[in-house]
Every structure is written in structure tokens, then in C-alpha cells.
Image: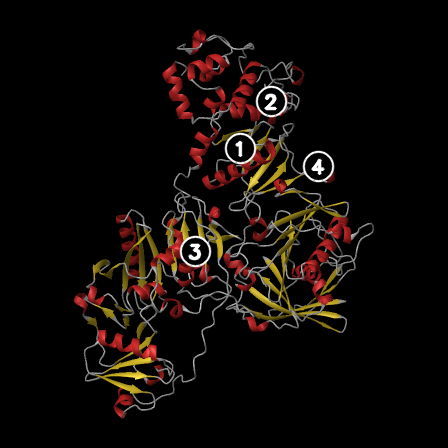
């Protein structure tokens, strides 16, 4: 079969002449040749990375190999061993051995997660996995997909290049482990202390740890490294790492401590090598002395939003024996391009390849989806590890849907929302909104709009208060601040709307933001700030103005004098009640009319209230209320088709205008999506967190929640880059492949001041979660502290000569036997094996002291100066040399309890008791 890719842009594809396996173990199509006019042709080989049909391999029993899927879990992980699917223990989830392939199935169980969500089936390939393992996994996935009814979203994952969806399952991170079958059978052994390894920890929101060579050569200045010695785990933070990276690295370290050591290993953190002398002694004992400066890390290849903005849709079809892939459209894409009898490839700037399978497409086409996607990847010259996602008609992922301008579910979703007016016609219940934040989020209403309202107009770059009688009368040439104060569960909360007119100048918009910052300072950072563009006002903004929002063209001068005033004005009145009504001034000409709405024509002598044929009784009633508040002039009601001649004369004569019945508004069925924001080389980089929860909001983060109708930017209390947050939200909208409206409201929220319109998008929300939230520094100083095992080992290092390898003048590392005490799970004390290097002629310290056997009397330690202490005693830890009984008698607690305290408390007690 021949593959022909035809593009309208005649892009150049790199030819490849022979089959190969890349370093991730992913075979590519057999051969490629390049032809004219940007058309690439590939011959599909018989042995592909993903099998074209679910044929079994020799010795593989599919029927026996498919395990039962437990209904009580969302996540299921299997490893391929001896051509069988073997379940991975839950405590080992997130551990992946490089010589194996894994299958990961996620079946959402929660009510919220299942709204529009489908199952996800991932095929993960280790970089050292062989062809047999890949073939077995591919066949199992095909059969598992059939068992699931074919509705799952399929993902191809390569080690180190996994999708955000895959990474989101494993918190606080994934661990890439060396080895194959023998080591994988154990997965994770609790209380395993006989270990020496070095882990390279990388990543921002999604963290990974990779086993690397146990050497200083593995280190760099920008990443985190974990030296795991069994009972002691030392996290070394590069000098260029951020505090958020340190905190996430520590979370992964603590997770390994709990899962692999039952919480009994002791953790030390090196933030400053000069201050962490004890820990550095241990590291240099294992790794040797470091020579030279540390290198910088390799540049991060994160894909920015600009790259993801390029989207191209290709139609895939067969002509005789040839497979033809033809470019169909570029962004913004529309859903009607997808026909259910066909299937398509969607290329998102080379960062990800989607395959969409119509429900009426052939079975063989569906089975060959990955093969064709990989042939496309090679023909386009993309990296072989490029992520591939296969989606089925009616079970598309949220990420796929948002690549289109709009998306309507073919089967109506049971949203229990029949429009704003149906739910709030009688009156919103404040208690109901606060007790059901998910309702508040979907209605975009924090309360019933009965709170206090203050309005300021930005004039001469300062804010001028407005008379409450004119709160709803705004001008397109001005900017306004609208402060809303309300109570939630007895607590005062605030929303500050920053309203920007279409005709406002750049300096006024800048002044609007500056004045908003001043107000926020006055309210001690408690303001939720929502940026609103004229014409795109959210429901709550309209509700607090009680349906009286009227936007005039032009600018408002001092003392509310119009600059300049027009003799003839036409206003478009839209809405059915006080919660959704707004009135906008439009050009005073007949073409601005619409048969579905109500218009007010104001002349020097009379006002005409014009009712289109398609307007409802609610529209008419609301329009009369608005017009009465706007003008006290004589009003004449005019029905469409019965206009007097003077009406048309005032509009400059008759002209065509929209008269067709307005179709119901198409409500796109998009799921909310959560991203971590960061900047790389001045470009916005987003990391998605799929199946998100409140746990994913970290104090060091700036998070973007896209609910399609609004963009929320959540600012963690310790995050940097607050000033760039709104700019990031605007850049996100500008670069969105669906061609999003730049007028979409942007809401800025600080940690601890979340309104129900934000918290309602989370499955659960604990308002007290961050009440006693410790910072990274507090965790390191208090929660970890100085631990006995570390002191024991450093004391031994002080009292023994360590081995040196005579190579380039570098101190040699201790052998594993040397540190046997730290690794032997049965031993209670740490020992230095004299056979491990005690006979070296060069000492680790300039003046080693003799060994101290047992404990020392309290009289030799209390209130003694450093020079008066017995030889071998560390002056910084005199209390350590007390017997257990003396320690308990003096300090009133055990050594274990003492060393688990915060450092400052330890120092304080030592000063009081004469051990400082």
C-alpha cells in the first residue's frame, strides 16, 4: 500500500530511505521517498510498532492474558512480562522500568469527571524495550480496546515525552528505573535499605525522576538530585532551581520515603552546600570530591503556545491500493468538517498528532490508526516520540474538542441547565448558590446580586466616584471600576470589575489597571479582579446593575457632560429580565435594526420604542423598564411594519436589516481545563493538569482555568509573576487554535479568596485547606530537621579515615560496604567497615580524631567550651554523645523526639540547658 500526503502549503518533508528503530524503540514505516509539489510517499511495512490487526504473537494467549478490571479504581496499570499483562501493585504506580512496556487504563468514576469524559487507554514504551515487548503490548491494547467497546481514547506514550494526561495520573511524579524483568518483578519493596542510587529530578508541574550514574558528572546547576542511601535520602538542590521546583522535588522525595521505606528513612536537604556541611560530607564520601564547576542543564524543550496555535486537518482515504492523506483545512476549524463515515489526522504544530475515527468508518481503518499516524509523523519529519492520540466519534477528549471553534455534543448532555432565565426567573437563592458552588460556577453568579455596588470612572488617570443614580450609564470612550461587596458564610468578599470601553485609549486602560492595584492594596489583596470588555459583560455584572446597563457612544467628560452629544441616537435593548439585560448604543441607521429585538430611537422631540416581530413579551416588558429609567421624554411605541414616515426619516431612510428568526444559541459542550503557567524565553508555556482537583493548586503556582466562557487566573500566595498573569491570559486567548474571542472575561484570583464561580469547577473544595499550610522552608526546617541517622553517619565520618582513589587527585567514594549501616535494614547503628577504605593513607579531614566508644558523662559535655571537650566530640552536637537515659533526664524527651523538632527549637533548648 502506498501513502500519499498532499498539502496545500507544499511543505517539505524529509526523506527516509530505510526502516529503523528510534532510541525509544518505536519502529517506523519501511521506507519513504520524496516527490514533487510537497507530496511524500511511504510504503507501509509489514512489521509496525502498532499492529494493524490484533494478531497474537507466538506463545501469547490473549484470552488468558486479559485481566479483570477492578470497578472500585479509576486507574489500572499493567506491565508486559513474558508476553502477559501483569498488574502492577498500587503502591508501585508511577514506577516504570526502561526495558518494559506498560498499559495504563483510566476509567473516570466520579460524577463530575464523567460529564463528557471517556476512558483513556495508554501504551507506554520504555526507551530500552525490545520489539517483542512492544508487539505484545500492542496486541493486548487492541483486545483491551475491543473489551471496552472501542470507546476509549488511545494514547501512544514514549518514555520522557508522555502526554499531560498520562503525567496527571501520577502524583507527585514518575520514576524511570533502570533494569528489566528481574527488577521489575519486585516493583517496590517496602523497607528496602540495601540501596545506593542517584535520581535526577526534573519538571515543573509534572515531575519525573530518572536513575543516573552515581557520580558528580551527572549533576548540573539547574536541576535537583536525590542521593538515596537507604536509611538516608539527601536531596541536593541546584543553585539555579526555583523554590517551587525544590518543593515539588521534596514532595517526590517524601513519597519515595513513604512508599519504599515505610516512612522510616531520614531526609536531608542541601540548599546551600556551605551551610549543609554534614550532608555534603556524606555526599562526598559516596561520590568523591567534586572537581571543577557544575555545568548548566540542557535547554528545556517545552512547547510554547505559539507552536500549538498551528493546527491542520487532513482527510484520510484509500484510492485503490493507495492511502491518500490530503490537507483539508487550517485553524480555526469547525466541527462540520468531520464526517462520520471517514477518519482524519489533525496535526497540532507537530507537538501532537490526533486521529479522529468516524463512527461509520471501517474496522480495519480503526485498527490501523496508529500505523498511519506513525507513517504521517515520519513523512512530516517529526520526532519519532511525537505523542499520538486516537479519538472516536462521540468520545472525543477535552483537548481535541477545544481545537475547534465550537463543539456540540451529538447526544444532549444532562446539564440540568435550561438557560439563565429558567433558573433565576423567580429569584436566585443565595444559600443555594453558596451551598452548591457548582451551580454558581455554571450560572457565573456568586450570589443574587443584592450586595453593595460602588462605581468609579477613570478620568485624568484617576478614579472619580459616580452617583448611584447613574451607576449603569457607561460610555464607550471611558474605563470604569465597579466594586461589588457581598457576604459568603459570614465572611465579607469582594469582586472588582475592570470595565473597558471599545473607544478607551491606551493610557486610560493603563490607568484603569493602576487604580485597580491601588484599590487592591487598600483592601489588603482581598479583591477578585475581573477584566470585562464592553459587549461581553458576564451575567453577574449585568445583575448587579439590575438590568440598567446602558452603554453610550463617545466619552463622558467632567460632571457627566457628553463629548460630543449626538442629535440622533439609536439603542439596542437585549434581555428578558434584570439578570441578563443590557442596552448598547448603535449607529443610527436602519441597517442596525433586527426583527428579533427591541430598539429605542431618540430624536430631539420624541422617543420611538420599536418592537421587532420576533421579540418576546419578556423582552418588551424589560425594554419599557429600561427606557423609563433612561429618558423622561415622550415615548411612542412602534411595531415592526407599522412605522410612521418620520421614523424612517430619522434613520436616514429604509435599508435592509436582519429579519430571520434567531436560532437558539449554540452552547458548546467544552469541559473546563486547568493549566500551570510559566514563561520560557519570553513565551508562554502551559502544562495541563487533567482530572484536576484542589490538590493541584500549589502556593508557588500561577494556574489558568479555562471554562470557555471565562478565563480564571489563580495566583498562589508564594508565586512570582503576578504582574504577568493578565498578559498570560490574553496571550492564551490570542494563540488559542480555536480562534477565541479576545473579549472573553479574565478573572484574577488570589489564594484564599476564591469565589464560588471558581471553586464550583472543582469536585470538592476545602476552604480551610491552606489555613496551616507550611512553606517549603518551614517543611525543611521543622518537618525534616536534623535527624539522628545523619548525625550518626557524620560522626563516623569524623572518626574514621576514608578511602581515596589516586586518580587526578580526587577523593574516592566510599564503597557500598563502607556505608553498610545506612543500608542494612536490620542494624540499629551505623558503622564504617574498616575493610571499605579505613587503611587509606590520605584522610578525609585534615586532623582526624580517635573514635569515641559509647556515651560520655554529662559533666564532660554540659557548659563546656569547644576546646575543653573530649577529643572526637563535635561541638555543634554535644548533646548527641549523652546516653539515652541522660538525654531523657536532661531534655525531657528522647533523641528521636528532639531531632524531629524545628532547628530553632533545638538550638533554643540547647542554649537553655548548656549544650550550645
SS for dot 2: loop
Above or below 123: residue 42: below
Give the number of the mark in front: 1 or 4. Answer: 4
Q: Which residue ends up furthest to the left in the rendered image? A: 559
Question: Mark 3 or mark 1: which comes first in sequence?
Answer: 1
Q: Position of residue 74 (x, y in %)?
A: 59, 51
Task: Please state if 576 lies on the left or on the right of 252 as rendered.
Answer: left
Crowd class of label 4 (few under 14; some 14 to 19; many from 20; radius 10 Å): few
Question: Mark 4 or mark 3: which comes first in sequence?
Answer: 4
User: Which residue does the numbered mark 4 point to in the structure image?
Assistant: 183
Give the number of the mark in front: 2 or 4. Answer: 4
Corner quadrant of residue 911: top left
SS for dot 4: helix
SS for dot 1: strand
Residue at left offset 19%, top offset 64%: 467
Q: Position of residue 834 (x, y in %)?
A: 65, 15
Task: Please state if 856 lies on the left or on the right of 466 as rendered.
Answer: right
The residues tagged by marks 4 and 3 sit, at their Cα atoms, a distance apart of 44 Å
User: Which residue does the numbered mark 2 point to in the structure image?
Assistant: 811
Above or below 281: residue 182: below
The residues tagged by marks 1 and 4 sit, at their Cα atoms, a distance apart of 24 Å
Amino acid at each position: 500500500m502506498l501513502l500519499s500526503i498532499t498539502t496545500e502549503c507544499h511543505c517539505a518533508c524529509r526523506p527516509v530511505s530505510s526502516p529503523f528503530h528510534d532510541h525509544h524503540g518505536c519502529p517506523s514505516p519501511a521506507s519513504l521517498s520524496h516527490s514533487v509539489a510537497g507530496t511524500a510517499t511511504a510504503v507501509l511495512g509489514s512489521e509496525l510498532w502498532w499492529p494493524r490487526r490484533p494478531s497474537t504473537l507466538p506463545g501469547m494467549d490473549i484470552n488468558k492474558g486479559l485481566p479483570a478490571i477492578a470497578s472500585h479504581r479509576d486507574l489500572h496499570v499493567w506491565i508486559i512480562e513474558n508476553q502477559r499483562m501483569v498488574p502492577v501493585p498500587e503502591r508501585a504506580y508511577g514506577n516504570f522500568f526502561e526495558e518494559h512496556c506498560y498499559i495504563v487504563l483510566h476509567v473516570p468514576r466520579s460524577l463530575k469527571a464523567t460529564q463528557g469524559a471517556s476512558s483513556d487507554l495508554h501504551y507506554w514504551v520504555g526507551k530500552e524495550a525490545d520489539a517483542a515487548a512492544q508487539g505484545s503490548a500492542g496486541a493486548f491494547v487492541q483486545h483491551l480496546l475491543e473489551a471496552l467497546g472501542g470507546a476509549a481514547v488511545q494514547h501512544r506514550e514514549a518514555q520522557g515525552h508522555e502526554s499531560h494526561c498520562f503525567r496527571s495520573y501520577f502524583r507527585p511524579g514518575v520514576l524511570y528505573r533502570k533494569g528489566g524483568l528481574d527488577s521489575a518483578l519486585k516493583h517496590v519493596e517496602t523497607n528496602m535499605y540495601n540501596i545506593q542510587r542517584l535520581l535526577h529530578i526534573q519538571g515543573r508541574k509534572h515531575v519525573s525522576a530518572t536513575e543516573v550514574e552515581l557520580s558528580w558528572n551527572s549533576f548540573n546547576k539547574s536541576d535537583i538530585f536525590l542521593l538515596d542511601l537507604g536509611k538516608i535520602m539527601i536531596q541536593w538542590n541546584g543553585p539555579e532551581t526555583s523554590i517551587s521546583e525544590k518543593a515539588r522535588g521534596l514532595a517526590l522525595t517524601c513519597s519515595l520515603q513513604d512508599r519504599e521505606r515505610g516512612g522510616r528513612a531520614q531526609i536531608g536537604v542541601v540548599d546551600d552546600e556551605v551551610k549543609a556541611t554534614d550532608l555534603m560530607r556524606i555526599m562526598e564520601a559516596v561520590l568523591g570530591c567534586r572537581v571543577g564547576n557544575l555545568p548548566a542543564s540542557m535547554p528545556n524543550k517545552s512547547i510554547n503556545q505559539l507552536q500549538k496555535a498551528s493546527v491542520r486537518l487532513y482527510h484520510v482515504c484509500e484510492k485503490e491500493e493507495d492511502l491518500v492523506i490530503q490537507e483539508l483545512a487550517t485553524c480555526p476549524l469547525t466541527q462540520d468538517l468531520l464526517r462520520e463515515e471517514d477518519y482524519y489526522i489533525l496535526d497540532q504544530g507537530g507537538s501532537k498528532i490526533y486521529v479522529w475515527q468516524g463512527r461509520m468508518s471501517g474496522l480495519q481503518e480503526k485498527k490501523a490508526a496508529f500505523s498511519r499516524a506513525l507513517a504521517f509523523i515520519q513523512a512530516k519529519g517529526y520526532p519519532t516520540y511525537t505523542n499520538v492520540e486516537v479519538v472516536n466519534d462521540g468520545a472525543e477528549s477535552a483537548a481535541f474538542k477545544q481545537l475547534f471553534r465550537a463543539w456540540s455534543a451529538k447526544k444532549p448532555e444532562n446539564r440540568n441547565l435550561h438557560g439563565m432565565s429558567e433558573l433565576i426567573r423567580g429569584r436566585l437563592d443565595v444559600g443555594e448558590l453558596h451551598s452548591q458552588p457548582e451551580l454558581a460556577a455554571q450560572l457565573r453568579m456568586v450570589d443574587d446580586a443584592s450586595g453593595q455596588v460602588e462605581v468609579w470612572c477613570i478620568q485624568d488617570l484617576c478614579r472619580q466616584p459616580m452617583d448611584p443614580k447613574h451607576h449603569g450609564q457607561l460610555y464607550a470612550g471611558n474605563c470604569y471600576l465597579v466594586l461589588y461587596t457581598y457576604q459568603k458564610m459570614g465572611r465579607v468578599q469582594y469582586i472588582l470589575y475592570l470595565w473597558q470601553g471599545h473607544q478607551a485609549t491606551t493610557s486610560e486602560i493603563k490607568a484603569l489597571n493602576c487604580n485597580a492595584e491601588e484599590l487592591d492594596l487598600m483592601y489588603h489583596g482581598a479583591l477578585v479582579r475581573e477584566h470585562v470588555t464592553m459587549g461581553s459583560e458576564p451575567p453577574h455584572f449585568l445583575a448587579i446593575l439590575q438590568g440598567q446597563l446602558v452603554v453610550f457612544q463617545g466619552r463622558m467628560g467632567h460632571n457627566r457632560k457628553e463629548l460630543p452629544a449626538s442629535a440622533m441616537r439609536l439603542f439596542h435593548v437585549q434581555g428578558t429580565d434584570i439578570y441578563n439585560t443590557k442596552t448598547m448604543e448603535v449607529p443610527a441607521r436602519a441597517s442596525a435594526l433586527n426583527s428579533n429585538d427591541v430598539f429605542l430611537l431618540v430624536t430631539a422631540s420624541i422617543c420611538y420604542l420599536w418592537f421587532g416581530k420576533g421579540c418576546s413579551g419578556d423582552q418588551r416588558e424589560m425594554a419599557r423598564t429600561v427606557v423609563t429609567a433612561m429618558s423622561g421624554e415622550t415615548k411612542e411605541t412602534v411595531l415592526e411594519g407599522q412605522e410612521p414616515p418620520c421614523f424612517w426619516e430619522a434613520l436616514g431612510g429604509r435599508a435592509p436589516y436582519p429579519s430571520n428568526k434567531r436560532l437558539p444559541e449554540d452552547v458548546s459542550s467544552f469541559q473546563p481545563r486547568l493549566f500551570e503557567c510559566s514563561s520560557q524565553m519570553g513565551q508562554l508555556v502551559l502544562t495541563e493538569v487533567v482530572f484536576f482537583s484542589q490538590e493541584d493548586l500549589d502556593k508557588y503556582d500561577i494556574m489558568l482555568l479555562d471554562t470557555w466562557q471565562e478565563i480564571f487566573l489563580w495566583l498562589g500566595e508564594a508565586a512570582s509573576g503576578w504582574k504577568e498573569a493578565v498578559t498570560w491570559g490574553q496571550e492564551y486567548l490570542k494563540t488559542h487554535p480555536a480562534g477565541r474571542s479576545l473579549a472573553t472575561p479574565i478573572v484574577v484570583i488570589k489564594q484564599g479568596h476564591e469565589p464560588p464561580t471558581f471553586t464550583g469547577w472543582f469536585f470538592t473544595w476545602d476552604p480551610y485547606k491552606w489555613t496551616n499550610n507550611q512553606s517549603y522552608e518551614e517543611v525543611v526546617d521543622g518537618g525534616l530537621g536534623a535527624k539522628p541517622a545523619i548525625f550518626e553517619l557524620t560522626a563516623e565520618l569524623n572518626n574514621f579515615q576514608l578511602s581515596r582513589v589516586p586518580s587526578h587527585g580526587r577523593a574516592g567514594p566510599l564503597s557500598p560496604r563502607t556505608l553498610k549501616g545506612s543500608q542494612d535494614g536490620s542494624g540499629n547503628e551505623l558503622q564504617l567497615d574498616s575493610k571499605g577504605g579505613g587503611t587509606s593513607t590520605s584522610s578525609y579531614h585534615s586532623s582526624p580524631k580517635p573514635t569515641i566508644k559509647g556515651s560520655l558523662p554529662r559533666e564532660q559535655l554540659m557548659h563546656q567550651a569547644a576546646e575543653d571537650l573530649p577529643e572526637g566530640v563535635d561541638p555543634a552536637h554535644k548533646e548527641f554523645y549523652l546516653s539515652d537515659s541522660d538525654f531523657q533526664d536532661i531534655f525531657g524527651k528522647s533523641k528521636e523526639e528532639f531531632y524531629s523538632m524545628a532547628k530553632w527549637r533545638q538550638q533554643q533548648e540547647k542554649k537553655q540547658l548548656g549544650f550550645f
